[in-house]
């Protein structure tokens, strides 16, 4: 039976983002080998919300923006959700104290999915309350990547750490294995409107599948920590890792638009403003683009 989670504040914590551990030295995207070690893990597929985390042991994060108000951001951390109502200048703790919010997905309406380390939850009221999800078929709830098919909200994908990629066709009630070759090392996951799956695999780079995970091809030889598809222009995608990369052809080709010494993870587009996007650096800096991801500046 699903259980409801009430809002509560983490004890002994200030309303600020904990610091990230140091990331590897700055490199160009194409200099990252598929097996390179280093950056903290993160995956993002979300409508409007931004999430963050940090600490001495490293953090995973996810990001997004409110569908009707691009100034309202939600930031997910290992200790719960933080929110900003002024575009990221100020943050306050919101809810889910102690829960890992590594992934957020908002397929439409008031439905929001949250997944992370041993956490799988669903909200049907825009984040006001949350229910635990305990589906059949998943080997564990250590979900490092999560995505909803934009063409069919009943189809979900979960990348389970050390196991593989799992797919649900019934809205999360049950899952079955889609791939045991991809998924165990995936930190970023996204599904495009045409059904293609993009997976940021820490060993193999950015991979693409056009057959629901049965086969894969490499699109980018880099460690990708976050992925975001522009809801108003699905051919325009953002990927984060050693910096920020932009694709204008649905993920088939990429170019670096910002190199960051500490790397970046959470990334999200505004649904109400097609030109506006946010990304969170591992140095706790919020970056903003107002021209469709072409250029970025530190913000807040």
Image (spheres, rainbow, N blue to C red):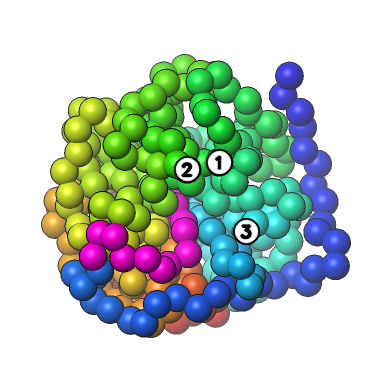
Residue 262: image quadrant is bottom left
The answer to whether the residue labelled 1 contacts the one labelled 3, judged by CB atoms less than 8 Å apart, is no
Numbered range of the magenta stretch: 33-44
Image spot of residue 250 (x, y percent): 19, 48
* Residue 167 visible here: yes
Read off the residue under disc 1.
142
Mark 2–mark 1 Cα distance, whole angstroms, equals: 6 Å
Read off the residue under disc 2.
161
Element type where label 3 sits in the image: strand
Mark 2–mark 3 Cα distance, whole angstroms, equals: 18 Å
Q: Residue 110 magenta-drawn?
A: no
Read off the residue under disc 3.
77
Residue 57: image quadrant is bottom right
Side of 99 relative to 299 (left or right):
right
Q: Residues within 10 Å of mark 1 (few under 14, many from 20)?
A: some
Element type where label 1 sits in the image: loop
Image spot of residue 38 (x, y percent): 41, 68
Q: Residue at x 63, y 40 (%)?
A: 119
Image spot of residue 47 (x, y percent): 46, 48
Q: Residue at x 64, y 70 (%)?
A: 55
Element type where label 2 sits in the image: loop
Q: Residue 37 magenta-drawn?
A: yes
The answer to whether the residue labelled 2 contacts the one labelled 1, judged by CB atoms less than 8 Å apart, is yes
């Amino acid at each position: 039976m699903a259980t409801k989670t009430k809002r509560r504040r983490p004890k002994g914590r200030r309303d600020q983002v904990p610091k990230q551990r140091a990331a590897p030295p700055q490199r160009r995207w194409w200099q990252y080998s598929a097996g390179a070690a280093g950056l903290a893990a993160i995956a993002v597929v979300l409508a409007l919300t931004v999430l963050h985390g940090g600490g001495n042991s490293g953090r995973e994060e996810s990001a997004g923006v409110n569908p009707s108000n691009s100034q309202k951001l939600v930031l997910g951390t290992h200790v719960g959700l933080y929110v900003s109502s002024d575009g990221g200048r100020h943050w306050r703790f919101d809810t889910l104290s102690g829960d890992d919010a590594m992934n957020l997905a908002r397929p439409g309406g008031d439905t929001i999915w949250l997944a992370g380390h041993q956490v799988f939850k669903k909200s049907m009221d825009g984040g006001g309350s949350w229910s635990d999800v305990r589906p059949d078929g998943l080997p564990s709830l250590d979900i490092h990547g999560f995505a909803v098919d934009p063409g069919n909200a009943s189809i979900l994908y979960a990348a389970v750490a050390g196991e593989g990629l799992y797919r649900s066709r019934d809205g999360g009630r049950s899952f079955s294995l889609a791939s045991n070759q991809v998924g165990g090392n995936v930190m970023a996951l996204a599904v495009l409107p045409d059904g293609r799956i993009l997976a940021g695999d820490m060993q193999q780079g950015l991979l693409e599948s056009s057959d629901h995970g049965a086969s894969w091809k490499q699109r980018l030889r880099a460690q990708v920590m976050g992925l975001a598809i522009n809801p108003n222009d699905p051919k325009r995608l953002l990927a984060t890792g050693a910096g920020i990369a932009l694709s204008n052809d649905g993920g088939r080709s990429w170019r670096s638009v910002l190199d960051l010494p500490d790397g970046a993870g959470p990334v999200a587009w505004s649904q109400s403003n097609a030109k506006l996007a946010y990304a969170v650096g591992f140095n706790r800096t919020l970056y903003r683009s107002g021209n469709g991801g072409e250029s970025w500046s530190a913000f807040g």
